[in-house]
Structure formats: C-alpha cells, structure tokens
Image (cartoon, rainbow, N blue to C red):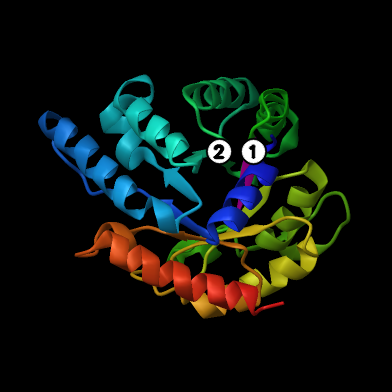
Amino acid sequence: MAFREKIEETARNKQTNIVLALDLPFEKPQNRQALLERAEKILETVHPYICAVKINYHLILPLGLFDGLQRLLQKAHEKGLVAIVDSKINDIGDTNRVIAEYYFTAGFDALIANPFVGWEEGIKPVFETAKKMQKGVLLLTYMSHKGASEGYGQMVIDTETGWSKPQYYLFALKALKWGADGVIVGATYPEKIREINEVLDGRIPIYSPGIGPQGGIIEAALRAGTRFLIVGRAITMADNPAESAEKIRNLAWQCLTTRY
C-alpha cells in the first residue's frame, strides 16, 4: 500500500489526525538506553491517539538507524502506526538517493525533504527511490519557527513563469508538479496554511507542526486547511502524555470532522 493510502486509512480507522513528534531532549551518550526506554514508554502510552510517529535527529543520532531505533520502528508498526523520518533531505542528488535508501530500508514509511535544492540532481532521486519502494515524500513548504520568513517567505522570481511570488507559494506549486505526498506548513502561520491550501486545491494534504509551545492553535490550523497535526512537546513533555494526547486528538478530530 502506498504511503498516502496507508496514513489516510490509519487516520480513518483510529479516528485521529495526530502525528507524534517523538523529539526528546539531549541525553549524554551513556544514557542512550534510558532515552530509548523513555521513547518506547511514550509511544506505548499514546499510540491509541495518534496515526503516525515522526522521528527526528533527537533519536536517530543517539540510538542509531540500524540499532536502537529499530526497536522504536518495530513498536510503531506493531501498533499500526506510520513512521515518518524528519530528515529534511537537502543535498545533491546522489547523496539524497543514498539517504533515502537508508531511511526506507530501515523501515520508515516516508521522509521529509527540502525543495530548496531543486529537482534535477537534487530532489528527483528521492522521489524515484520513494516510488520504487512504495514510500512517501513530504516537502517543507513553510516551517513553524519565527525565522521561517527569511527563507521560505522571501519574494523570488520563478524562472519558468517569470512570476514574482513568495518562496512558499512556488514550493506549493512544485509539490503539485513533483507529486509530493504531503507538504509541511507551520501551524503557527494559519494564513500561510490557507494560502498554500488554495494552491494545492485539496490535492495534497498539509502537515502542520508547531502546536502548543510554539504557539500554534489546533482549531486555527485545521480551519485554514491542515489535514494532519504534528505534535511534539505538548505530548512528550506533559506530566501525563497519554492524557494530553487524548485531549489533543479529541479536539482535533472534532474540529476536522466538522470542518466539512
């Protein structure tokens, strides 16, 4: 089953559009076992309320792609979850292809890539690898932090059309042209979500990080057009992660299902 079908089916069956960002604080290398156990515990307690887990370098670096991380990926799949690697691939094509092959071989169902590097000898090999292995590619279109406007929000000239448009607008067009499985747009910028959603015209789902500590609001993001919410610290750093995940899931699913 292709990635987009898999995550939509999981979301529908579990009635949740929450992607857990399992990004934990730094631990000294000698504490890597404790870090792994903490991540496993969180995943074990919150899995009923999420449809996917997103793993960043917070766990990839200390645990190892084919070492401790395999336990997490196995647990995620056993719980019926989709696994996304927050790799933000951003290199030349040959390197990007190898990166994608390693992540997909390790068991990830999709990865996140940065469209700044362009198509030819850039992102194209990632899409080719994903298609061959029936995996997904999500493109960064507008990030959730305050400095996002310095790159993703700058005005640029599109060499193909001659248009002067914001960078994120052109990235949304490229996501359509390249056949991306999703785009990342920060929940902290609902006006950008709305604008990008109009460009995508419902053909590509929007994934939005930044809920909670970064200031993103669930209702605002979903009403603007977000399909999946990526939630990290509001769950992982909560006194009771399962309780927090359940509350977020309930609010988000109610808002999503009443949006239409």
Residue situated furthest front in the rendering:
13
Disc 1 residue crowd, few under 14, some 14–19, many 20+, Cα 10 Å: many
**Does residue 207 lie above or below 100 as drawn?**
below
Q: Is residue 223 magenta?
A: no
Give how far across and how far down residue 143 sits, in percent: 52, 59
Magenta stretch bounds? 136-140
153 left or right of 232 in image: right
Image coordinates of residue 259 in percent, x first then y, are: 66, 78
Residue pictured at 32% horizontal, 25% vertical: 64
Can you identify the residue that label 2 sits on? Answer: 111
Residue located at (55% from left, 38% from top): 111
Question: Along the horizontal axis of the image, is 23 left or right of 104?
Answer: left
* 187 in relation to 11, above or below: below
Q: Which residue is mark 1?
A: 136
Foreground: 17 or 216? 17
Pointer 2 and pointer 1: residues touching (CB < 8 Å)?
A: yes
Name the dominant secondary structure of the magenta segment.
Answer: strand
Question: Across the whole image, how many numbered discs are drawn on residues?
Answer: 2
